[in-house]
Amino acid sequence: MTTDTKIDIPVMADLAAEGKQVDYLYWVGCAGAYDLRYQKVARSFAKILNHLKINYAVLGTEESCTGDAAKRAGNEMLFQMQAMQNIEILNGYGIKKIVCTCPHCYNTLKNEYPDLGGNYELINYTEFLDEQIQLGNLKLDSNPFLNQSITYHDPCYLGRGNKIYDAPRNIVKAVYGEVKEMKRCKSSALCCGAGGAQMFKDAEKGDKEVNIERIEDVLEQKVDKLATACPFCMTMLTDGIKFKNKEDEVENLDLAEIVAQALDL
């Protein structure tokens, strides 16, 4: 990492050693930590947190998988082992509020950790960014995306899973002015395919991959940009754009990247 790209991100263990507490814990997630494409999203969101001077920290090497993948695969014992380890760390630091960029982590921490003793206020980053925009803390009225067109893909675990439909669209509208909605959107949105494990296994019998059918919904809108809010959707839909040879026409960006770029961070 060069001096130009280095970002100062506070780590919880360092702050705790100094006797400090934080207002928010930023749960980075496995994709934000290890996937080269989604690391850019995690970096964008951290830049925004720093820009806002939010009192936050990450767990760093103490953060483990939430156990979401194990639970979806039916391995309840492994899920509970991973969850209990995380809960012990989070409770040890006295964490009250957790903000997530990954909707799968958000869903698991919010809806499945309370049964195991992990009770926190979960905030999805789209809700966090929308609130900061509404408060006037993020000035987006002059940005490089004005006059460009964009559509938004609803991630399953954000939309149908947790009923978060308005916050992502409010962010897009704050930057682009409007959202060109696909024919299948909000509660009727088509899955990118990752939620059905199509990201991790060979194709099933049929005429078309799910992500190809979804990217055709996107291309019908004839937009310059596609906004997503999930690392799995990012991968599946970017693959769809490449399959259609449309990389020069449509760019897939996460909402955190859109806001960070609009702020020239």
Image (tube, rainbow, N blue to C red):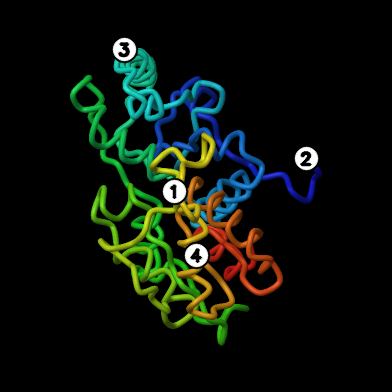
The disc label shown at residue 77, or none: 3
Task: Pinpoint residue 66: horizontal percent, then vertical percent.
Answer: 39, 27
Q: How many marks?
A: 4
| Measured Cα–Cα span from mark 3 to mark 1 | 26 Å
Q: Can you say which quadrant of the picture contains the N terminus? A: top right
Foreground label between 4 and 1: 1
Judging by the rendered image, the residue that carries numbered circle 1 is 193
* Disc 1 residue type (three-letter): Gly
Residue 85 figure quarter = top left
Tell me the crowding category of disc 1: few under 14, some 14 to 19, or many 20 or more residues within 10 angstroms, Cα based: many
Task: Pinpoint residue 246: horizontal percent, then vertical percent.
Answer: 66, 69
Q: Earlier in the sequence, mark 3 or mark 1?
A: 3
Judging by the rendered image, the residue that carries numbered circle 2 is 1
Closest to the observer, 80 or 131: 80
Tell me whether the residue at label 4 lies in contact with that at label 1, contact meaning CB atoms closer than 8 angstroms. no
Q: Earlier in the sequence, mark 4 or mark 2?
A: 2
For residue 164, above or below residue 114: below
Foreground label between 1 and 2: 1
Tell me whether the residue at label 3 lies in contact with that at label 1, contact meaning CB atoms closer than 8 angstroms. no
Closest to the observer, 177 or 207: 207
For residue 61, above or below residue 7: above
* Disc 4 residue type (three-letter): Ala
| Measured Cα–Cα span from mark 1 to mark 2 | 33 Å
Q: Earlier in the sequence, mark 1 or mark 2?
A: 2
Q: Residue at x 47, y 68 (%)?
A: 138
Judged from the image, the secondary structure of the residue bearing numbered disc 4 is strand
| Measured Cα–Cα span from mark 3 to mark 2 | 38 Å
* Disc 3 residue type (three-letter): Met
